[in-house]
Image (cartoon, helix red, strand yellow):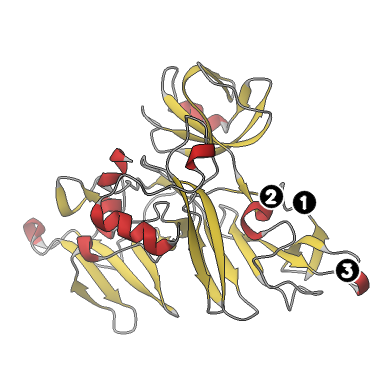
Amino acid sequence: MKTTTLKAAAAFGLGALLMGSAAAQESVSKPVGYETLEINQQFNYVGLRLLGAPLATSTVATAENAEITLASGTVADGPVIVEVIDGDAAGAVVEGTAAGGVITVPASLLDNLEVDNAVTVRAPQTLASVFGAAGESLTTGSASAAADLVLIPDGAGNFDTYWYSSGGFGGVGAGWKQLDTATNASTDVDGSAITLVYTDGIIIQNRGADNSIVVSGSVKTTGTTPALTTQFNYLSTVYPAGATLSSAFDEAENPGVLRAGTLDSASASAAADLVFVPSGDGFNVYWYSSGGFGGAGAGWKQLDLTTNVSTDVVSTEVSLDSASGIVIQNRGALPQGVAIEAPAFYADL
């Protein structure tokens, strides 16, 4: 279903976000649908909010030596995305590799993941599954300077950059390429093997006419805790309809009050984490003020980057529906997890 339908579902709190291919999904599947992402200006900040299909949801049977096994369900060999549902690691999302019933995960995950914690194992999205095996959703070209570029954060403040080559005469050499922006040299890659983690925001540099990309998949209904690993972090907003600044970061019982474990607040914008929400050809920038003496004046603010003046905003009224990708400027310690909650009505989907 299209973005407008998803928004309508959010507005009425419907339990059917979702239709389309739902009947074809396994019993572990969540609601499914599709979302249209508009690709207009030169640089577009987007996120994948319809996800790869859940392959299994289970408690963890064993967790040691950077490997986990599941108490129930089987997962075919290959790359996977592992989401932790409960326990100390709840909200964590990591890449893994399944082989022979064992899933290899980053060793650091096992610092907090324990036996009997629940996880969902999900099929990953890839360059080819999102943008087309032949780059059908992008402007292609015989040279990188003419083609759309897909920039994926590498977790260290830089990007891996990809494009689709239409090839030379007769299409010779056509295929997905990775661009080294330092040397301007490109190398062949398998677009179906380049996995995309849905917590990452993606930058699409559009070199052609206004365009749109249709992303289909499953809706996530539980919270997500992406890691902030650098000063500027490009993130997906994860939830395709009904999300607001408040649903993402506030205390559920106290809208307008920042929830612990999310962003760093401060008495001045220069010290607080900033949330950049794309708006046209710029950004709306938000932060949470801890207030003055005794917390006076605490609350959400919108920062005008030109004048450095902040004004009060109502976080429940700042919609993230049209912002599939955001940027968080982290002013605190690194690395740091930032807990993003699903809108409350997702629990009923």
Q: Residue flagged by tag 1: what amino acid is it?
A: Asp
| Residue on which the image places disc 2 | 194
Element type at mark 3: helix
- Please report contact status of discs 1 and 2: CB closer than 8 Å, yes or no: yes
Label whose residue precedes the other's in the sequence (2 or 3):
3
Q: Earlier in the sequence, mark 3 or mark 1?
A: 3
- Can you identify the residue that label 1 sits on? 190
User: Which residue is found at the position 40% from the left and 43% from the top?
Assistant: 225
Q: Determine which quarter of the picture holds residue 151.
A: bottom right
Residue 139 position in % (x across, y down): 68, 73
Q: Position of residue 1 (x, y in %)?
A: 45, 56
The amino acid on which the numbered mark 2 sits, given as a three-letter code, is: Ile
Are the two marked residues, 2 and 3, in contact with CB atoms closer than 8 angstroms? no
Camera sees residue 263: yes
Answer above or below: position of 313 versus 54: below
Query: Left or right of 98: which side holds 248?
Result: left
Residue 242 visible, this angle: no
Q: How crowded is mark 2: few (under 14 residues within 10 Å), some or many (20 or more)?
A: some
Q: Which amino acid does label 3 sit on?
A: Gly
Observer-side mark, 3 or 1, equals 3
Q: In this view, does 179 lie to the left or right of 346?
A: right
- Residue linked to disc 3: 171
Residue 341 coordinates in the image, percent (x, y): 32, 46
- For the C terminus, the image quarter is top left
Identify the image quadrant of residue 273: bottom left
As measured in the structure, the alpha-carbon distance from the residue carrying label 2 to the one carrying label 3 is: 22 Å
Q: Is mark 2 on a helix, strand or loop?
A: loop
